[in-house]
Every structure is written in structure tokens, then in C-alpha cells.
Amino acid sequence: MSGVWMRRVVLALAFACTHIVVLAIHLPVREFAGDGFFDHWDFYGNVDNTTWGNVTYVDEPTARAQQLIYTNGQGNVVMRVDNFTTLTPAQLVLRNSLRLTTKDRFQIGSLIIIDVVHMPYGCSVWPAFWTLGSPQDWPVGGEIDLIEGVNNMGFNQIAIHTTEGCYQTQIAEQTGVLLEGDCSNDRGCITRETKPNSFGAAFAQAGGGVWALQIAESGIYAWFWSRPDIPENIRNATPQTPIDTIPWGFPTAAYPNTRCNINQFFSPQHLVLLTTLCGAWAGEPSVYASTCQTPTNSCFADNILGNGANYLNAFWEIRYIRIYLSEDAPPPPPPTSATPTPTPTQTPPATTTDPRQLPPPSTSSGSAVGLQWDNSWANMKFSGILGLLGTIFML
Ligand SMILES: *[C@@H]1O[C@H](CO)[C@@H](O)[C@H](O)[C@H]1NC(C)=O
Ligand SMILES: *[C@@H]1O[C@H](CO)[C@@H](O)[C@H](O)[C@H]1NC(C)=O
Ligand SMILES: *[C@@H]1O[C@H](CO)[C@@H](O)[C@H](O)[C@H]1NC(C)=O
């Protein structure tokens, strides 16, 4: 082998290496799973005053007392709608549900992977898993809807919301279908999933699936796989495994920065997980009628009222949410410590609650706890690069 050729190979490898490391390798920074899942989220504790569903998003003590949240026998997190209270007609009727927001925000450079076994579905049901830059100043800071749909829709929709100046075009590099291209309009710019079993009953019957959301300076990218199609590097990953996005191929939705300046329109994002009922989308009469035929064609009267038995399937069952950070991103800030969760019977009257007097957070094992932040971040970075070099040299 000539020296020139050798040098070319080495240069090519070096280029491939930096290129892949910068764009594709993501290191684990956080897992939300199991008993510790709810420790790092804020509970909305108010009626749905953003999408006008007929729900009260309860606080944590109420959610625990009514068993709207718990960990099931498989170790998965369950979050459900009240399906046991009988509601009768009145001036204002609201059913109990949940809206959770992470205390922490996740910066550009993050990769979010969520493994869902079951999502809420049925007439009037509107589940969503999304990210939000600024709760006070929407849509400044951006919004990314990764999982969202209503009623008996057969497919998931992905959307982003921004202030004016961010667009999406139908490009060959996404498998989904573009429905709306201006991200500043009311509905955002929307891509519809084309893979089967991405929403509702069919999603659950297939055993659920996984979504991945990459928020990078180069663009925002969202992938979906039904349970049988989950890529090997996700199926085999532990919470400590770095993740490479290259083997995944084209995403469902791509928002490259050529039409939307990600740094300009997106600030670090909170994660939001919720289920609402009826409201501005699911309860809109023509939307409701398009997939639900019920006795009076009223989202409210045919669903919210009554004993709630129709909400048997209005629950999330989640194996984990994992957060990763791109190799080239600055190190993450330490996680916000969990607010101690008093059990309902121990809840002191609000007037005497002094947060400083509450016990320190319990050290729950593994879940929703930052993987040692300080020097292990550097170590993981180093071993990630070594692993990659190893792979390249084996080729
Ligand atoms: C919803 O209600 C809460 C509590 O009153 C309030 O803090 C919040 O600003 C309201 N949000 C909107 C969008 O009106
Ligand atoms: C359903 O909820 C909306 C939004 O809060 C409210 O305006 C409406 O009055 C509710 N309907 C009933 C019958 O309570
Ligand atoms: C409510 O739904 C759960 C599943 O989420 C089910 O196990 C339970 O039996 C239901 N309760 C009623 C009263 O229908």
C-alpha cells in the first residue's frame, strides 16, 4: 500500500469520524421511568385553559389519591383519565385528567426517545406528548408536537409551532406527508405519519412503539416505529448506551434549518405529557364527526357526561423517556432536584407548607435521575469516540 493512499484513507476516516460524531452520536443524560418518573414534573393543577377541553388537570396529591398515576406490574408508568366518576349535566362539567411539564428544559442538541406501550384513545380523547420553549410567551421559544391526534384518528401527526418566518416543505428526506407548511399559522406546520399503527387502538394492538425527536441546529427530525420495527440500537439500549441516529434512515418529519432557523425559533424545551377531552380540536363538531358517530354527535354530551366507562382506554402506559445530548453540544446543566411528593394523607394545609421544612427527596434508584453529571459526561464522551473509532477501524 503506497504512503499516499494510506494518508488518504486516514484522512477520510478522520473526516467520517468527526462528521458522524458531530451529527449522529448522542450520549445519555437522563431517564424518566418507573417509580421515580413523576418526581421531575410539575402538575398543572388547573382547568384546561389552553385548549378548552372539559377537564381539570389535577395536582399530584389528587392524581395519587385517585390512582390516576402509578407504576404497573411491568414497571411501566400509567397516567389515566378519571373513568369512574359519574358526571351529570351542570353549568360547568369537567372530568379529571393530567397535564405534566418537566421542571427542566432540554437544549438544542438533545435527542428525546419515548417508548410507549399504550396511548389514550377513543371518542373525545386528545392525547399529546410535546415540547414547549416558553409557557409564558407562546409561541416564542417554539413548540414541537411529537405525538398528537384526536378521537378515532388512524395516524399520528407531528407539528411545530413558531413565530413568523419558519417553514416546512415536502422534501424527499421525510417519509410523512406534509399537510401545512407555515409553522406560524394556528395549526403549525404539520406532517402526517404514513406508517401503520401510529395512533390509537391499532397502536396499542401492535404493542405500542417508539418515537425519537432530534432537536439540532441543523434541523428538527422525528422518527416513529411500531413495536416490531424498533431499530436494534434502541431495542438493545440500556439507559447508559450512546445512541447513533445514522442507522435509522429517513425520519417521518424533517424540518431542516434551510427553511427554519432552529437557533432563532427554538429555545431549550420543556417536555409536556397530557390527555384532554373534547376542546378546541377533538370537540370541534366537524372533526369529531369525521371519526366518531355517537347518539347525539355531541363530544361533550356523549362522552364527558355519564359514568366514564367509555374512558377505559384513555390511558398512557410508558416504558421510558430517555434524553440524550449530541457529542458536540455543551455539557448539560445539572437536573433540578425533585420536589418531595407528600402522599395525600400527609399533605399539610397549604398555609403552613414551608418547602424548606419538607424532607429531602428520596434517592430513588435509577429513574428520573441524572446519570452522574460531572466527570462521567467527559468519560462518556471519550468512550463514545473510542467506540466509534473502534467500529471504523474494524470495517
Ligand atoms: C391558566 O390558569 C392558570 C391559573 O389560573 C394561569 O396561571 C395561567 O396563566 C392560565 N393560562 C392561560 C393560557 O390562560
Ligand atoms: C366544557 O368546557 C369548556 C371549556 O372549559 C366550557 O366552556 C364549557 O362550558 C364546558 N361545557 C360544559 C357543559 O360544562
Ligand atoms: C378504568 O380503566 C382501567 C384501565 O385504565 C380499568 O382497569 C378499570 O376497570 C376501569 N374502571 C371502570 C370503573 O370502568
Image: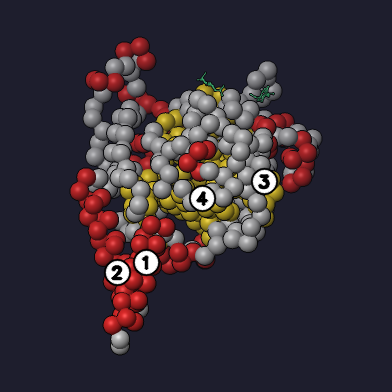
Would residue 306 be seen by someone viewing this image from the given angle?
A: no
Could you say which is closer to the camera, residue 291 or residue 280? 280
**Mark in front: 1 vs 3:** 1
Q: Residues within 10 Å of mark 4 (few under 14, many from 20)?
A: some
Residue highlighted by disc 2: 389
* Disc 4 secondary structure class: strand
Residue highlighted by disc 1: 15
Residue highlighted by disc 3: 181
Residue 260, horizontal then vertical, whole percent: 57, 45
* Disc 3 secondary structure class: loop
> Which corner quadrant of the image does residue 15 belong to?
bottom left
Q: How far apart, in angstroms, are the residues tagged by discs 2 and 3?
A: 40 Å
Q: Earlier in the sequence, mark 4 or mark 2?
A: 4
Placement of 2 over or under 275, stated as above or below: below
Q: Which mark is residue 358?
A: none
> Which corner quadrant of the image does residue 246 belong to?
bottom left
Could you say which is closer to the camera, residue 2 or residue 177? 2
In the rendered view of the protein, which quadrant contains the C terminus? bottom left
Give, as a three-letter code, the residue at label 2.
Leu
* Disc 1 secondary structure class: helix
Could you say which is closer to the camera, residue 85 or residue 9? 9
Residue highlighted by disc 4: 219
Q: Earlier in the sequence, mark 4 or mark 1?
A: 1
Q: Residues within 10 Å of mark 3 (few under 14, many from 20)?
A: some
Question: CB under 8 Å between callouts 1 and 2?
Answer: no
Residue 367, horizontal then vertical, whole percent: 32, 46
Q: How many marks?
A: 4
**Mark in front: 1 vs 2:** 1
Q: How far apart, in angstroms, are the residues tagged by discs 4 and 2?
A: 26 Å
Would residue 364 be seen by someone viewing this image from the given angle?
A: yes
Please identify the residue farthest to the front as the structure is shown.
4
> Which corner quadrant of the image does residue 96 belong to?
top right
